[in-house]
Image: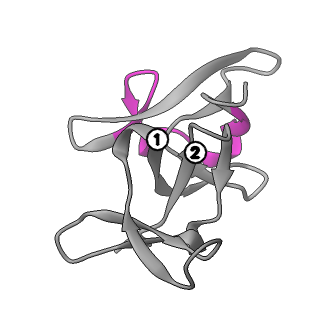
């Protein structure tokens, strides 16, 4: 079974937040741990303020973890490269319409993500 990890984009500060700042309960609801004003108080996240992206369970050719929303360079040939976005659809992580497992990880390199590129 793959490791269940996620990263969180904070739309208000336009940056990724440390996942230590977040918790998920048994109902699947996300909470932010507010340590600025209240020590370890859980406050339910306002969904419109955050985007949650799942870890695919895969790493690129440099060993970097690939998340939903990453932009990858795909080496198609000796000197041919294309760019595409990782998304989750039809029950699988996909890149260019194909399931991620169809690619050799030595062909893939993270070059950015949908928020910072």
Image quadrant holding the C terminus, namely: top right
- Residue ID for mark 2: 10
Q: Quadrant of residue 2?
A: bottom left
**SS label for mark 2:** strand
- Residue ID for mark 1: 49
Of labels 2 and 1, earlier in sequence is 2
| Residue 46: percent from left, percent from top | 37, 48
Q: Residue furthest bottom?
A: 39
For residue 7, above or below residue 21: above
Mark 2 touches mark 1? (CB < 8 Å): yes
The total number of labels drawn is 2
Q: Is residue 47 magenta?
A: no
Density class for disc 2 (Cα within 10 Å; few <14, some 14-19, many ≥20) is some
Density class for disc 1 (Cα within 10 Å; few <14, some 14-19, many ≥20) is few
Q: Residue furthest left?
A: 27
For residue 84, above or below residue 50: above
Q: Nearer the viewer, residue 22 or 2?
A: 22
Q: Residue at x 72, y 30 (%)?
A: 116
Q: Residue at x 64, y 64 (%)?
A: 18
Image quadrant holding the N terminus, namely: bottom left
Alpha-carbon span between mark 2 and mark 1 = 6 Å
| Residue 86: percent from left, percent from top | 49, 34
| Residue 50: percent from left, percent from top | 47, 44
**What label sits on residue 18 in the rendered view?**
none
Q: Nearer the viewer, residue 38 or 23?
A: 38
Residues shaded magenta: 93-112
Q: Residue furthest right?
A: 79
Q: Residue at x 57, y 85 (%)?
A: 39
Q: Quadrant of residue 74?
A: top right
Left or right of residue 26: residue 77: right
Q: Is residue 102 magenta?
A: yes
**SS label for mark 1:** helix
């Amino acid at each position: 079974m793959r490791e269940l990890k996620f990263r969180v984009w904070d739309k208000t500060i336009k940056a990724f937040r440390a996942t230590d700042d977040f918790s998920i309960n048994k109902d699947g609801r996300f909470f932010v741990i507010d340590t600025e004003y209240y020590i370890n108080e859980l406050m339910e996240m306002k969904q419109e303020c955050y985007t949650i992206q799942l870890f695919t369970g895969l790493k690129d050719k440099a060993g970097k973890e690939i998340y939903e929303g990453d932009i990858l360079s795909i080496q198609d040939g000796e000197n041919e490269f294309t760019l595409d976005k990782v998304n989750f659809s039809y029950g699988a992580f996909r890149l260019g319409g194909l399931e991620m497992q169809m690619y050799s990880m030595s062909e893939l390199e993270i070059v950015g993500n949908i928020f910072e590129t």
